[in-house]
């Protein structure tokens, strides 16, 4: 089967490369897609060094021409991993950065999927669509709200799409990585350095803030992502690390219990964690 992985672009490429290699080892014909042409040769060289056979293509999901090109690939498994993370307060992030967040994480991947899903339906042989969401698509944290909003949108799209495509034997699943030490989370807390705004109007001083949680070794999410793409896991939602499952479910209940006056006049503990945490802190078991 032909599987397309968007394996590099922005900060979101770290987890997909080893997972794509895992699909090759399982016997799939893998098309590894990168955001810009400069990344094509780099990935080809890395694959050759590991003895992995990949077809590498340039695919910027925000580019209509690139999306049309992908319709020529005969995709049977689509892994939507395109993603960028914009860190900062919901009241500070500039408009262009908000739009870019949704174009890359939501609009572009959905438009790509529309064309490929219709091809799957027309072939009549089923297919599989995997959306790489996030734990942030289920919970929220301060300073990742716009990124989280984009992943909440992905959750809504994936769940609805699963209902809409089931009669055509097309499987839809999500993978929800938590805080893994791939560099993605820490880089989110540097995007403010390139904002085109008036720093004096910001509510927070981002030079003093860091991602508010310790992070896990990413090997577990690589394995899960590979297994979901290969159809070896039949659950719709797949969260890693599994040790965060109960916390995630509990936090989903918090908005139902929260009062609008809770904590007024005090700093939320999660915000305080951002002031206290050092970047790239690994979870110690």
Image: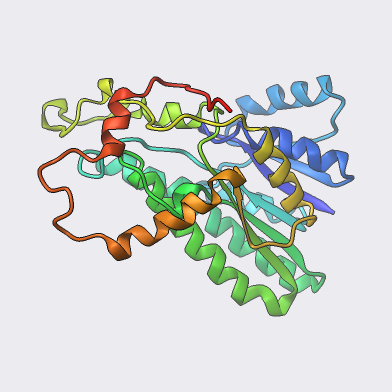
Of the pair 220 and 169, the residue shown nearer to us: 220
Regarding residue 13, the answer to whether it shows in the image is: yes
Residue at (45%, 48%) from the top-left corner? 136
Colour scheme of this structure image?
rainbow
Residue 82 percent across, percent down from the top left: 56, 43
The correct choice, above or below, for 80 with respect to 92 in the image is below
Of the pair 65 and 113, the residue shown nearer to us: 113
The correct choice, above or below, for 26 with respect to 251 in the image is above
When asked about the image quadrant of residue 241, the answer is top right
Quadrant that contains the C terminus: top right
Q: Is residue 172 left or right of residue 194?
A: right
Residue at (85%, 54%) from the top-left corner? 1
Residue that extends furthest to the bottom in the rendered view of this protein: 167
Residue 245 percent across, percent down from the top left: 55, 51
Residue at (53%, 46%) from the top-left corner? 244
Q: Is residue 222 left or right of residue 159?
A: right
Residue 251 percent across, percent down from the top left: 40, 54
Residue that extends furthest to the right in the rendered view of this protein: 27
């Amino acid at each position: 089967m032909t599987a397309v992985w968007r394996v590099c672009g922005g900060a979101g490429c770290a987890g997909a490369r080893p997972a794509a290699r895992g699909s090759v080892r399982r016997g799939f014909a893998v098309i590894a897609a990168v955001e810009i042409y400069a990344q094509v040769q780099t990935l080809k060289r890395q694959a050759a060094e590991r003895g992995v056979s990949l077809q590498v293509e340039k695919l910027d999901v925000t580019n209509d021409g690139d999306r049309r090109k992908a319709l020529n690939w005969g995709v049977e498994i689509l892994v939507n991993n395109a993603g960028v993370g914009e860190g900062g307060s919901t009241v500070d992030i500039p408009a262009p950065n908000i739009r870019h967040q949704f174009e890359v994480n939501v609009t572009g991947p959905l438009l790509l999927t529309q064309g490929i899903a219709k091809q799957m339906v027309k072939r009549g042989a089923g297919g599989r669509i995997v959306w790489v969401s996030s734990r942030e698509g289920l919970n929220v944290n301060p300073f990742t709200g716009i990124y989280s909003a984009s992943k909440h949108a992905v959750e809504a799209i994936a769940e609805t799409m699963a209902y809409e495509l089931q009669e055509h034997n097309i499987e839809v699943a999500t993978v929800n990585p938590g805080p893994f030490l791939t560099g993605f989370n820490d880089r989110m807390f540097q995007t403010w350095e390139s904002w085109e705004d008036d720093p004096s109007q910001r509510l927070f001083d981002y030079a003093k803030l860091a991602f508010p949680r310790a992070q896990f070794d990413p090997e577990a999410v690589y394995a899960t992502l590979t297994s979901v793409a290969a159809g070896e896991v039949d659950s719709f939602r797949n969260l890693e690390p599994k040790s965060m499952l109960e916390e995630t479910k509990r936090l989903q209940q918090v908005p139902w219990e929260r009062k609008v006056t809770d904590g007024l006049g005090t700093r939320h503990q999660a915000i305080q964690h951002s002031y206290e945490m050092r970047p790239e802190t690994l979870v110690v078991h």
